[in-house]
Amino acid sequence: MKKLMLINPRGPKAGFMRSAFSSWPPLGLAYVAAATPPDWQVEIIDEDHEKIPFEPADLVGITAFSSRINRAYEIADAYRTKGIKVVLGGIHASMATEEAVRYVDAVVIGEVENIWAKLLKDFENGCLSQRYQGSVVDFSRPTLRPRHDLLRSNYVWDSIQTSRGCPFNCNFCSVSRYLGREYRKRQVQECIEELKSLRRDWVLFVDDNLIGYTEEHRSTAEELFSRMVDNKLNKRFWMQTSINAADDERVVKLAAKAGCAFAFIGFETTSEDSLRTMKKGINLKVGVERYTQVVKAFHKYGIGVMGGFIMGNNHESSAYYREIADFMVRAGVDVCQVSFLTPYPGTAFMEQVLEEDRLLCKNFPKDWDKFNFSNMVQRPEGVSVEDVYKGVNYVKGRLYSFPAYQVRLLKSFLKVRGNRASTYFSYKFNRVFREAYLHAHYHAKVKHLR
């Protein structure tokens, strides 16, 4: 029987990924395993949790984000030196294919399910191509269920995906180019059966937007939540959704009843000019002035809110950093993920900073290690990189200093009406981000703002 090794390379222990609490199974590799014929023996290795044995194999498959791609190339080189063919897939390989093909034997571009059987057949026949273009998976038909049974048991979270694609086209995000702008939902019954099979009570929905964008999407989300309740799954889950989900109280209430403990929402910024530059139209439509009401809409049903905020936009100032820090505290956002604006391959933002010669780190592939949301890798207009670091240091100092940090945790407990799961997640996520801040390379910088 032929052996296939599927590997998730280790990532930098920076930012959100410093803790095991904020890591989850490599679901993409579980989908590859599901698409593999039964005459192959498949093993999944997650280097975040275990060492790669570098045992003999017939074929090796690797997936990696940009910040992990150099480790992926190292692993590929180690196997290719032994005469073992290596295939690379995932979002970085799909967006930077010309680079990737220099380090592996074949690259899968896009979604894997419909092209994997052909790739394996070509491998068996000794005619492996350099590039394989995957087609969009039709979720209106029955789809493969990922091989959760091949994933290790030492995760805090299980993970599931119920949709792919995003109709939005934010300039800093490559999801719409990678998975398309058509929002595709899996059949609800398929999702329920997969949820039943998961071993853990804590689940992460990896969908970029679980609730969706239209009335039809929301209706499907309501059906999913209702079926979770009817089947008494008793899962506690974390989801990502767009800011307009708060407009529909019914779906938020159902999500809470189904076990939603936390919702990640990309607020990004309180600057309307920056939102326009980001092409974050949905936030502009809802309105910055309504951000606080969005948080309250989730709190009403005991759901905590993790707010995503992006720093390093053009023309940020000392006044702006004070304003957004005030908002984070005043609005009652339970957990604040503060990241640096990063131009990833395949994004309109990367194209823009390259055209304007504002990319600071461009010794590729080596510099991909710095593309982890914890470094300023581009030079914004109207503000120095040093001042952005100082600004972020000020914001995080406000969030995690004594007694503000402890008061925020207490308020979070009260706002979610004592929901134990939401309170615990809030405590754990805040602790993760606080530790990340205290170990950040910019933490020791002067906090004074002009």
Image (spheres, grey):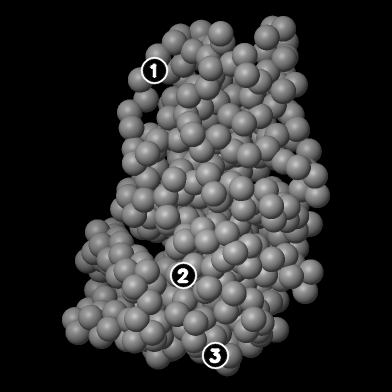
Q: x, y percentage for residue 324?
A: 44, 84
Of tags 2 and 3, the one toward the viewer is: 2
Q: Secondary structure at mark 1?
A: loop
Residue 248 vs 227, above or below: the answer is: below
Tag 2: residue type?
A: Phe
Quarter of the image with the N terminus in it: top right
The residue at which mark 3 appears reads as: 293
Give the x, y percent position of residue 361. 48, 50
Considering the image in quadrants, where does the C terminus appear? bottom left
* Circles 2 and 3: CB atoms closer than 8 Å: no
Residue 128 visible in image:
no
- Inter-mark Cα distance, 3 to 1: 52 Å
* Relative to 14, residue 324 above or below: below
x, y percentage for residue 363?
49, 41
At horizontal 48% and vertical 31% (from top left) the residue drawn is 150
Residue, disc 1: 54
First-in-chain label (2 vs 3): 2
Question: In which image quadrant can residue 338 be found?
Answer: bottom left
Q: Residues within 10 Å of mark 3 (few under 14, many from 20)?
A: some
Q: Residue at x 27, y 83 (%)?
A: 410
Q: Quickly name the residue at label 2.
A: 262
